[in-house]
Structure formats: structure tokens, C-alpha cells
Image: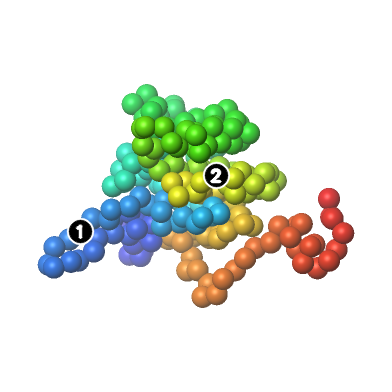
Amino acid sequence: MSNAPVSTIRRLITHRIITRGRLARRTESLARAFAHPEGAGVMGPDARNLLRTVLVDALVDGPERLDVVIARPDLKQLLGNASLPSERLTPALHMPATLEDTIEHLESRLSPTSLTEARPHRPTLWLATPGPDADVVHQTLTHLPTANLIALFQGPWPYGPTHFIEANGPRHLPTQNLNLLSRNQAAARLHIPNTR
């Protein structure tokens, strides 16, 4: 076996805290380690591996069960041609056909009227690849209650942090805030007419 350092992701997954001489397991899902109120992006050579790990953690392995919303193309991108997850995950795994359908699903599921129903909602993990639709996705996030929503996106995310995932885990974050700007935000700050 190689003497490679233990993966940061693996350490996050198996993280234990020593308290009063006992080992205590983590109490929150791995997704919460990357959560941000306006969503977070992941990119880099192992971004997909992280998203797979977060997906499995949210549905079966983690200490906290989450409902997961992911478009079928994104799920296929993560799992390849493997068969879809077992039907026992169906109540927690929501797989709309497209990103647009995913947005509609989230809007109906997390609308103020559906949240006031008698049954409590588990936290929801939204995994997506917004690409050029980042503005639409961000607009959706701003209209949804984010207290129980964790949005984690593949690719750079101009409205929140983007984590660079290397082969041995996440790269250390900068010590200062780094706010990535969309094209329109940069143009507005530079007082340039709309670039579209």
C-alpha cells in the first residue's frame, strides 16, 4: 500500500471528536460541511467524487438523513450507466427529468404553504449542475426558505463559495472572503453596459 495521506474527505466522513475520554460520532451530514445560505459550488479533479460521497452520505451512510433532489442527467453523470438507486430510497430521492423540473419541484415542495402542513420536512439537499443557468438557480434560491435547504452545485458558483476539490480532498479556503462575480455583476461594478 502507498503512504499517501488520508483523504480529507475520508477524514470528514469518519470524523470523531474526543470528548470526556469517549469517541463521539458526527451528528450532521457531510453536506452541511459545505453548506452556504446562497448555495456552494464544487469543482476540481475530485468534485464528482465529493458529490457522490455527499449523495450516499445523505441517503444511507450519514448520521442525518436528508431528502435529495437531483435531476436525472446529473444523477447519471454521478453514477454513470449504473442502475438507479434502489426503490427503498424513493421517498427521500427525488429525480425530476431536467433542471427546470427540479426548480419547479423545489418551489412546490418548499413553498410557504407546503411547509405549514402538519408533517415535518426533513432537510433537503439540492445537487445540480447549473452551468449557464446559474442566474436562474440563484433567483430560485433567493425565493426559497433556506433554513432546511442545502444547495451544492457542480462547477463554479458565483453567488457563494466554490470549493476546489483535489485528489486528497478540499483545498484550504482563502483566509479572506472571495466573492466571485457573474458577468453581469462584474459589468455593473465596472459600470459597463449589459454584456449579453
Circle 2: element type? loop
Name the residue located 67 percent from the left edge and 44 percent from the top edge. Answer: 136
Q: Which residue is mark 2?
A: 144
Residue for badge 1 = 24
Q: Nearer the viewer, residue 9 or 59?
A: 59
| Labels 2 and 1: the sequence-earlier one | 1
Query: Camera-side residue: 44 or 155?
Result: 155
Relative image position of residue 31 (x, y in whole percent)? 42, 51
Q: Amino acid at mark 1?
A: Ala
Q: Is residue 179 above or below residue 149?
A: below
Res 123 → quadrant: top left
- Is 179 above or below relative to 183? below
Describe residue 98's horizontal placement relative to residue 58 as left or right: right
Q: Tell me what residue is drawn at x 33 percent, y 52 percent.
A: 28
Q: Residue at x 51, y 75 (%)?
A: 175
> In this view of the protein, can residue 29 be seen by the observer?
yes
- Quadrant of the rendered image containing residue 118: top left
Q: Amino acid at mark 2?
A: Leu
Q: In this view of the protein, which residue sits in the foreground, 21 or 189?
A: 189
Label 2 crowd bin: few (<14), some (14–19), many (20+), radius 10 Å:
some
Report whether 67 appears left or right of 99.
left
